[in-house]
Amino acid sequence: MLTLDALTLTQDDFRLTADFKIPTGTRAAVIGPSGAGKSTLLAAIAGFLTPESGGIRWQSSDLTETGPGNRPIAMLFQDNNLFPHLTAAQNVALGLRPNLRLARDETKTVSAALSRVGLADHQSRKPAQLSGGQQSRVALARVLVQSRPLILLDEPFAALGPALKAEMLDLVAELLDETNATLLMVSHDPADARRIADQTILVADGTAHPPTDTKALLDTPPEALKAYLG
Amino acid sequence: MASGPIAIKRALPGWIAAALVAAIVLGTLSAVAMRAEPGRGLGPAEWAAIRFTVSQAVLSAAFSVLLAVPVARAFARRRFAGRRLLISLLGAPFILPVIVAVMGLLAVFGRSGILNETLRFMGLPEVSIYGLHGVVLAHVFFNLPLATRLILQGWQDIPSERFRLAAQLGFTTRDIFHTLERPMLTRTLPGAAAIIFAICLSSFAVALTLGGGPHATTVELAIYQAFRFDFDLGRAALLSCVQIALVGTAAIAALKFSTRDGFGAGLDRPVQRWDAAHPLLRIIDTTAIALAALFLLLPITLVILRGAPALTSLPTSVWAAALASILIALISTVLMLALALPLAIAAGIHSARLETVGLLGIAASPLVIGTGLFIVINPIADPFALALPVTATVNAIMALPFALRILTPSVRDTHANYDRLATSLNLTGFTWLRLVLIPRIRPNLGFACGLTAAMSMGDLGVIALFADPQTATLPLQMYRLMGAYRMELASGAAVLLLGLSFGIFWLFDKGGRARADA
Amino acid sequence: MKYLSIAAGLFAATTAVAETPVLTVYTYDSFVSDWGPGPAVKAAFEETCGCELNLVGAGDGAALLARVKLEGARSDADVVLGLDNNLTAAAVASGLFQEHGQTVTVDVPNPFGEAGTWSDTHFLPYDWGYFAFVYDNTKLATPPASFDELAASDLKIVIQDPRSSTPGLGLLLWVKEQYGTDAPKIWEALADNIVTVTKGWSEAYGLFLEGEADMVLSYTTSPAYHIVAEEDQSKSAAAFGSHYMQVEVAGKLAATDQPELADQFLTFMTTDAFQSIIPTTNWMYPAITPAGGLPEGFAAPIAPEQARLIAPADVPAIRDEALAEWQAALSQ
């Protein structure tokens, strides 16, 4: 269970509060108007932003003082998810061993992850030699080998076309089925939420609201969301 | 959004390196000052020297940087066979020993140089190179290559994706200039100008020889005079402080302008310029490259033609000196890396002001550093036994500002673009250095190492105080040949020196750029 | 005493055998170079002294004195060789040198006393020369015979800066000694003849050989190099009637730990074994003409009717005034 305990986040004059729990295994979309603080919320959970007050807990352990790399979290950003100078396999391997010194079975794990996302033949390519969709797959393969219980996606597929994005989301759903990880996924497209997230966290007016049923929320949106959905 | 503790941890070695450099530069300065007997302080002659020094340095820096812009732009926009080699070749003047470069310039612009021979042949009046314009010309000759490389680097730091977007948006050349190139230039030019200003500030032999007389007295010459003519160490230290203050002012001014917002990351795709196909631009670029090549390479070609015949008759002592120079160059390069890498990391991710520490190296007079080290070392150790480490250390410190200018922006970019990813993957410490930073900044590292090694090759060494007679460097051996009337052999040694300096630069530079791209 | 020597690019430290006494002589760099007198002098002295002669190059003459002053009484040096008549007063004033206690008869022109006598109590001479303007006799048939003629001509000359160069200082004092209060006028008249002023002798001579100037300030003995070493007769020194002298000397440091060896070296310096090495390595006149005479090429040096020299003790006071005049006249 992820607990956001009376969390207050501030950045310059921006302010966001959150106070709720997300049960393990939840797949939650984070939606809300542009600039409402969706990415800020994820950044704080991932450890890139120190909360002004309140705490973040995973299961029973307090994460508030833990460095980003040591949290039980795998995260994908809007861009720069891959190092351009490393091959696809190396980029994936970083998820297992940040120093790239893999044991034999770990090398196999990397290969298997790349095969799982359909890139068995592209292991030694560098990102510039891969298409946008393939780059996203490499990043997902890394999330797979990281096998962290909490996955944060900060719109990593926003640049992809609708069909490709849907494909990626399906892939994410499959991976979640296999790992039973908890997902928080920022999106500005309600269709994304409907596709793989049964819960949705609405971020609006300085507050991140507790997760509610996605279908119910989108079918009968509150005022703040109604304005955003148009 | 740097995570605080890690940034500070990464910056710590840089602060230590900065303290070390400051200790060496300022420590030697105070050693000299404390050894001083009462002198006469700064007189009108010294103030005149300060005025001349500043004005020639300002002009030299301005012309070097402004003339480098079209050349760098041409190289950034054009792709042609031999482009890389030409860029490297154009760097040659910067690594030339002063006296060789002056001889080369005079072979073109001197009284019996190509230019005046041509003018005479055409019945036109001759032009004299001697005067302030000659000093500026020579300094542009030396520093145009550096300015071009620094600015070209700025161009190359703009990811190809931005140019692609610009092309897609139908940007004209002017639009590209306003949105992409001008911001890059306002960021790059002040730093480049500050470095060249600092280099020209400590000019001595070039300014005197081409300035044509004592009105072309620089601060460095005044320091030299204080030392050997008057043995007035206090005045030497005072003048050195003036030099440091001048460079410091320039550095602070430069930093003010070069506040930076990066262009974000690209995917290391080769840059393609869709806007550059216009025939007029093609002509402009070709002209810029051709003129720069002519200006920079003709004097060097003449030096080579003049000295090449003597290459085969060089005595073994010259070859031995060449080996000693190579060794010193390599050690200097290693030391430079040990100082510059932590400093660049600290400057790139923590405090940009740290970069100014590097400028101390060229701000301080080598004569003062050498003498200060001598005063400090002499009571505790044999200076000759320490000739090698001292020479290598001073060479490394002299190269530091260039290395930092080359490395810091790329460190900053890497940090801005990949810090979150690296942090989330727990890439820290040496692993981060090995897997993220060094691969990202490798071309810059190669360039900085090449520059350091080449500058060290061409350096006369930390003056005679530490020159071990048994291990003369190549430039010293060349001067000895000249001092013994062997001008032919000296010009042969100059060609050897030029070849080695350039070779070592090219190897490093190429090594840095060679990517294992499958 | 430690050396650093190169063997195939590797530095290997070797320690001299402890029993052999070592005499350390600081000198200027071109003296110790392969083309200077150093190697031959070292071999010749070590044949007789049962010691090791450690010749240490330390810049040029003025840098040499600065270095000894920096080191003070701690200096490793036993003898300093390579100061000239313009530096000896400052050297004596430093108190770092002791009297040599030797009497020699020399072949150095003596404007202040009887021919052949040497009166400096601290320093002994090893060679000397006249400053002169050297020119290419294939291009210039009738060279000027005085500063006035030079100033009146449109010939171009290269000179050295007195602040950084020994010949440059020599020229400064030459003009001052010959013209006294009129020296500034001479410099003003020469201003349009001076192509440029260089840091040192090498740069100036290089510029002259490259054709940047018609004449260069050097020594009357410079043509001898071209005649002897290159069989090139085209370089001559212009006879100005009188020429300023440079006398190069050596002295014993007060703090030497090898006083006997130092004395032995200074004595050796005035013998044929040392003196015969000088002409074709240092390209100066030996202080005592060797038994075999001067080599060919030295045979016809211009013999100035009047050798010019400012007494060493007067140099410090005069040179500052002369320098100020020089700077003022050439800075316009």
Image (cartoon, helix red, strand yellow):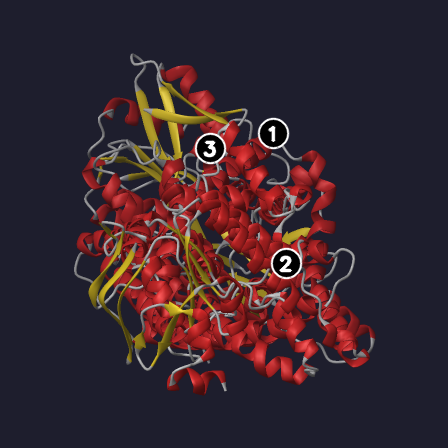
Disc 2 is attached to a residue of which chain?
Answer: A
Between A5 and C77, the residue placed more toward the observer is A5
Q: List the residue tagged with mark 2.
A: A133
Query: Is C11 on the left or on the right of B158, as rendered?
Result: left
The amino acid at mark 1 is Thr
Distance from disc 3 to disc 2, alpha carbons, whole Å, reads 61 Å
Residue B238 on image: x %, y %: 26, 64
Q: Distance between the residues labelled 1 and 2?
A: 63 Å
Q: Position of residue B195 (x, y in %)?
A: 45, 66
Q: Tell me, yes or no, whether dots 1 and 2 are on the same chain.
A: no
Dot label at residue B69: none
Q: Which of marks 1 and 3 is nearer the N terminus?
A: 1
Label 1 resides on the chain identified as B
Kind of residue sitting beneath label 3: Thr
> In the image, is B254 to the left or to the right of B65?
left
Q: Where is residue B383 in the image (x, y as percent from the top left)?
A: 31, 36
* Quadrant of res B41: bottom left
Closer to viewer: mark 3 or mark 2: 2
Quarter of the image with the N terminus of chain A is bottom left
Label 1: how many Cα within 10 Å (few below 14, some 14–19, many 20+): few
Q: Is residue A53 left or right of residue B515?
A: left
Q: Which of B30 and A200 is in front in this view?
A: A200
- Tag 3's secondary structure? helix
Pointers 3 and 2 in contact (CB under 8 A)?
A: no
Residue C110 seen in render: no
On screen, A83 above or below B308? Answer: below
Please tell me in which quadrant of the rendered image residue B242 appears.
bottom left
Reading the image, the residue beneath label 3 is B471
Disc 3 chain ID: B
User: Which residue corresponds to mark 1?
Assistant: B316
